Amino acid sequence: MIFFAACAANQGDLVAAEARTAGSDDVRQTSSGVEFNGTLEIGMRFCLWSRVASRLLMALYIDEDTASDEELYESTLALPWEDWLTPDKTMKVTCTTQSCSWIRNNHYAALKVKDGICDRLKEKCDGVRPDVDIENPDITFHVHVQGNTVTWYVDFSGESLHQRGYREDQTDAVLKEHLAAALICRSEWRRTVNDGNPGIFLDPFCGSGTIAIEAALMATDTAPGLIRKRPYAFQSLPGFESETWEKLLEEAKARRQLALDERDIRIYASDISGRAISIARDAAVKAGVDGLIDFKEKDFTAFRESDVPGPVGYIVTDPPYGERMRIEDIDYLYSGIGHVLQTYFKGWRATILTGSSDLLSNIDMKPDRTNSLYNGGILCQAAHYIIFTDEEKQALIERAKEKKRVRLSTPLSQGAETVYRKIRKNMESLEPVMKEEGVTCYRIYDADIPEYAAAIDIYEGKWINLAEYAAPDYIDKEKAEERLNEIILATERATGIDIENIYVKERRSQKGANQYSRLATSNRFNIVHENGLMLLVNFQDYLDTGVFLDHRPVRKMIQEMANGKRFLNLFCYTGTATLNAIKGGAVSTVSVDASSTYLDWAIENLKLNGYPVDIENFFYRDDATDWLWETYDRYDLIFCDPPTFSNSKARRGTFDVQRDHWKLIRAAAMHLAPGGTLIFSTNFRRFRMDERIMEDFTVEDITEKTIGKDFENNGNVHKCYLIKNKVKVSLSKKKTFKVR
């Protein structure tokens, strides 16, 4: 027979392994499941033992030359359905299609198959047709159409295989049984079970107890089918081999008893909710594993050494994802998880499932590996951690030191040596100036050697942001890769900053949404200092770190000009200019940006420095140009640093700074209070101020004053202007009087 096992996305390898364990030696993974050959006994054994599959179908007929819905009906009508169904039984038909041009609607195709089956039985059974029962049919047929190949199946398993039968009541957030089993199978703990020596198992966010119960079933070698409440569909099919089925059941019972007799099973489950613990206990009773799981009502973030069930063990858990929690609460929870793990669970291994991979950054540990799975339509990440002991950490540090020693003792290539010397020369020139100015984040190399095109910025003497300029298409890719590696090695050697703290990105010409696109989701922030302020920077997730270093003098100028002023920051990015205005004594600030990500970042920057986010420091998520036309307030100081190009979703059309800056400046100038100043800046290298602006406003080009020493060799990095409304002076004419 040919069987098809349906399963959740990314779980095909686990189900394929189950098919082989059931006895099939011909197994094939497909995009939606696993197909395998085998006897009826193999199919029954698969249903009895599968922990990860959701459904098993058995192929009845295959037609490789069907090209229309009418041909589908005729082919169905020609098949001997009387061998599987009698008119006194109810039926249901389901349908799926793939790469099929002649079926537009799966439901319609299912109706054509249903009509074919019913008409066939009517012809063979004295005009009597079977009834259709969508909810609880006696038999379910499934048809799958791929191109012109049609396969008719009968449902072999019946009720979904994940429904073990032990779960009735449940908490709000529930992980289905087969997904919990898949999560456990991905963990290191499953290997110990396969070896017959399951170690200590803990689920500290057990909820309804599904993970702990599935772990107990695995540890006791209990076939899920042994606790299933409803019979399988194959038990009602023609040709059901009851003796074979009884033999399989007896084998399964014997295996379970053997595991109970020989294995040391220690499974622990806890949850902060007493209701959840009560539900979990009841489910464990129904599953027959209540005596194997130690349930406890406990907040995991409050765990201490005495709560740890053993020196070494395995955690597999599914903490809240945050859908029902505030952002600050969920971040705090995951930070707490990381703290508890690293403090009290040294030597353990942990598998943590989350629907938001961003949350994993709060755990502050690097996963050994990750897996993806879908839970109720949510793409989740299963992160697997090795929680090192102090001794293991020290051994890792020593290995890293030795690796670094070998790397640094290896002579640089000629190209790397050239870059190294240039970086050292730049730093020797820059360091005294930067130190005198109190600057800790600055550029130390900017494509000084054309063949080695990269911008290298140093932050706090701890981190390097290395942005490689994309090589021209005519440069060999291997050669470009070699040069990049030489730049990295030269940078480490010249700065003394470990290679692990050198963050490498490729900088290429970008437009629209791509210029702000996310590179990763680490959510790992570091703190740097500038002009007496603390700023959050992110080296991994975006091309830019959150601080435009070339604008450092502009931000200092804003701080010096802001005292007693009402300040407006357009295209505010991460709010660094706003911070400087507040530091300089601005009476109020308004910051506008279309990105909620950057506004959140800006707000966190304010909080970091102890400044309130209130009516005096207000943030708007909007397109800056639209916002200018829709509001009427006046400001004494405005900073406007627009993107070179944008096709933001927040507004219709596109924005091109050279083409549209005159309209933007006019709109901003309408918001200038009498005597107010607009600081306009752009990084478009070929920018030319529109003559209409030059004629209608007082414009001062201050670009040279806003270029720091670290950018002097790249004086075209930005343009900057002071713009003011022209003062209109009205002269009254002198009147002359005649003397009579």
Image (cartoon, helix red, strand yellow):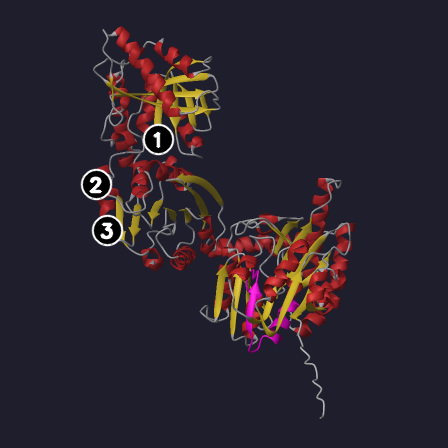
SS under mark 1: loop
Is 451 situated above or below 618?
A: above
Which tag, 3 or 2, sits closer to the chain's start? 3
Of marks 2 and 1, the one in the foreground: 1
The picture places residue 274, in percent across and down from the top left corner, at: 24, 53
Which tag, 3 or 1, sits closer to the chain's start? 1
Residue 413 vs residue 207, the one in the foreground? 207
Cα distance, mark 3 to mark 1? 29 Å
Q: Which residue is mark 2?
A: 285
Report the amino acid beneath label 1. Answer: Ser
- Within 10 Å of disc 1 (Cα), the crowding (few <14, some 14-19, many 20+) is many
Cα distance, mark 3 to mark 2? 16 Å
Is 632 situated above or below 18?
A: below
Whether residue 140 appears in this view of the structure is: yes
Q: Which residue is mark 1?
A: 54
The picture places residue 564, in percent across and down from the top left corner, at: 55, 78
Which tag, 2 or 1, sits closer to the chain's start? 1
Chain part drawn in magenta: 552-576
Task: Look at the image and say whether residue 556 sits in the magenta stretch.
Answer: yes
Report the amino acid beneath label 2. Answer: Val
SS under mark 2: helix
Is 539 situated above or below 48?
A: below
Quadrant for residue 731, please give it.
Answer: bottom right
Position of the N terminus by quadrant: top left
Q: Seen from this angle, which residue lies furthest bottom? A: 740
Report the amino acid beneath label 3. Answer: Arg
State the residue at coordinates (58%, 75%): 562
Residue 553 vs residue 161, the one in the foreground? 553
The picture places residue 585, in percent across and down from the top left corner, at: 55, 77
Give the number of the disc on residue 275: 3
